[in-house]
Amino acid sequence: MPELPEVESVARSLQPHLVGRRVLGVETSGLPLRRPIDRARLRAACKDARVDAVRRVGKYLLIDLSTENVLLIHLGMSGNLLVKPRTEPRRPHTHAVFALEGAAELRYVDPRRFGVLRSYNRADLAASPELKILGLDPLDPAFTAGYLRAQLGATRRDVKTFLLDQTRLAGVGNIYACEALHHAAIAPRRRTHALSAERAARLHASIVTVLERGIANRGTSFSDYVDADGAAGENQHALAVYGREGLACPRCGRKIRRLVQGARSTFYCPGCQK
DNA sequence: GCATTACCCTGAAAGC
DNA sequence: TGCTTTCAGGGTAATG
């Protein structure tokens, strides 16, 4: 389940394969992702295109093309972007293939089809329905404890649910929300507006810490996630609470519990998260 | 404004 | 063993 660190790892692993390379063509499976792929629009965007940059905003991967178009990709739950030799057989659920200069191709594989693949003119990207609603990326220098406190104060929800709201903070998903709250020793059911300045500052630092650790470990690989080279991440070994119901908290030793908030599992330690 | 629920989808795991 | 059911979850939309 790709969140910010996984998407960042994919972007970094794609860069050496893509930047400066020409895109020779695009094929699609014809099956819709979360929305249908506009094949004609995609082909036009990629015609005579060279890749200028690969970057990330929140959980979105952006591929800047020399045609003034940008490919916008969300990996959903089970999406992978893989660079493979043209001769290697394609896996099932391959929904888009970009032929690259040389002998390689970029493949978008997504069994559950929860992802997004669209293209925009560069000038229209910021106003796209996907990006225009996003809050700050937590690794943006503008993401400060003050910004977080203001966002927390603007709503009265459970703090765990708040962390998943991409319009407040773009890039945190279920794994890193649970980990950030445990790192900050804050209970997931605490209400946002009632968090003290001290707790908000702690949460801010913890969000950045767990995300940066996730990136350093090249992402969390539970089931599907691998980077563009097919390499799994290592962050699953660094998790304190996520997926560890019934196991001992690494900080205080109490058994980790699971609860459901907004139809998503929350893992937390009742001993040290207050 | 916010909570809740359903939906999209497949594969893994659990249950029978 | 083999079939059926349940569950996982990001984002969106409808409903209360």
Image: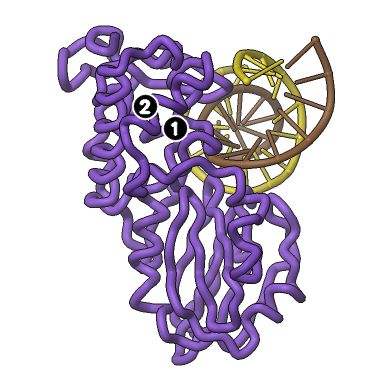
Chain colours: A purple, B yellow, C brown
Answer with the quarter of the image where residue B3 lies.
top right
Marks 1/2: CA distance? 6 Å
Q: Residues within 10 Å of mark 2 (few under 14, many from 20)?
A: many
Callout 1–callout 2 Cβ contact below 8 Å: yes
Answer with the quarter of the image where residue A255 lies.
top left
A12 is higher (above) or lower (below) than A2: below
The reply, left or right, for residue A92 in relation to residue A251 is right
Q: Amino acid at mark 1?
A: Asn
Q: Chain of mark 1?
A: A
Element carrying mark 2: helix
Answer with the quarter of the image where residue A254 lies.
top left
| Count of numbered marks | 2
Question: Observer-nearest residue: A195 or A226?
Answer: A195
Residue C7 placement (x, y as % from top left) = 55, 25
Residue that badge 2 annotates? A178
A170 is higher (above) or lower (below) than A124: above
The reply, left or right, for residue A78 in relation to residue A231 is right
Q: What residue appears at the point 29 percent right and 8 percent down from the top-left corner?
A: A274
Question: Observer-nearest residue: A205 or A171?
Answer: A205
Residue A112 visible: no
Residue that badge 1 annotates? A174
Q: Chain of mark 2?
A: A
Q: Residues within 10 Å of mark 1 (few under 14, many from 20)?
A: some
Q: What residue appears at the point 32 percent right and 13 percent down from the top-left corner?
A: A196
Q: Amino acid at mark 2?
A: Cys
Element carrying mark 1: helix
